[in-house]
Image (cartoon, rainbow, N blue to C red):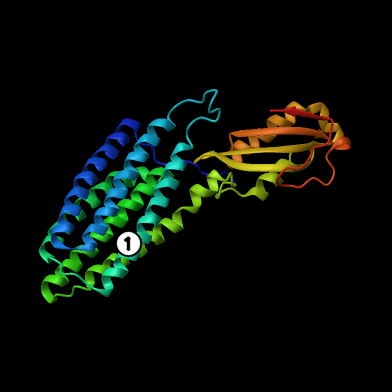
Amino acid sequence: MPHDHSHAHLDPKSGDRRVSIAIWANGLLTVAQIVGGILSGSLALIADALHNFSDMASLVIAFAARKIARRPADARMTFGYGRIEIVAALINYTTLIIVGVYLIYEGGMRFLDPPQVEGWTVVILGGVALVVDTLTALLTYSMQRGSVNIRALFLHNLSDAFASVAVVVGGTLIILYDMRWVDPAITIGIALYILYLALTEIGGPIRTLMLGSPPDLDNEAVVDAIRGVEGVADVHHVHFWQMQEHEAALDCHVVLAEEGWARMEAIKSGIKDRLKDRFGIDHSSLEFERLDRAHRDAPLYGHADASKGKSHVH
């Protein structure tokens, strides 16, 4: 059964323009929130500002990654530069985790001794932040479906919007009931939500960079499909990985039956067609072995010392 690797495409220049707008909006908002947080004494507002600052840094990283990823392969990077977006996503999720841990610490300290907070400043700036965060999330929403890099940004923005709602609610409670403990309590809540988002999403970029198998690929089905090609006796030393976010790749050793050795090129074409049509694997490297000279007791996955007498065909 073929895997659908299609995803929403947006003109690169239009996408870059959206990210640029989001960078400027988050930059201005961060400055306003930090100043407002200091003047009002609100840690929740400063926490939201730090989150917005991490968003701005993430947007800058993502913007640069989008530009670099479009470079063609060269002698230095023979697989191309597409994986830079995976690296950017990992950096952004790691930043979220650091910010979340710091905010829990600061919130805990202030929870023990809640400071005086100017509620109106918190509500007004929190409301402005909500508008900016919602705008930024909308700008990146249609782009995030096909890019782990932009998805990291979108989750930053989405968590910011929720955090801004919490800040406004907290400021309102301070105005109405002088509930000063609400400010650090909301800070800790925002931090926990940030950590939840980051920790649930960071596994994808790590898996890709660790050369893990594509998560939506049925490895056993691929192996069975290769074994099902006429003339193929067995498969071993199988490696699956993702060259880029949406490009699954495979290399393996294919053991040919005696009658299959004379039809090596036809068998190779048949395997590659199956890999592409059924599983969306466009890049595959196949090393062929004769059955009577094949590597004995070879593992299905991974690699071991190969026996002599194999023909390497791509």
Between 168 and 136, the one nearer to me in the picture: 168
User: In the rendered structure, which amino acid carries the disc numbered 1?
Assistant: Leu
Side of 151 where 116 appears, left or right: left
Q: Which residue is found at the position 34% from the left and 45% from the top?
A: 58
Between 49 and 133, the one nearer to me in the picture: 49
**3 vs 78: above or below:** below
User: Which type of secondary structure does the marked residue at label 1 adopt?
Assistant: helix
Side of 203 where 110 appears, left or right: left
Which residue position holds label 1?
A: 103
Question: Looking at the picture, how far across and down is residue 188, in whole percent?
Answer: 31, 67
Q: Which residue is found at the position 18% from the left and 75% from the top?
A: 179
Can residue 230 be seen from the camera position used here?
no
Q: Locate the C terminus by quadrant.
A: top right
Question: Looking at the picture, how far across and down is residue 264, in whole percent?
Answer: 77, 28
Residue 159 falls in which quadrant of the image? bottom left
Between 67 and 290, the one nearer to me in the picture: 67
Side of 242 where 294 appears, left or right: right
Q: Count the marks: how many?
A: 1
Question: Looking at the picture, how far across and down is residue 121, in whole percent?
Answer: 12, 60
Instruction: Name the residue furthest top.
Output: 75
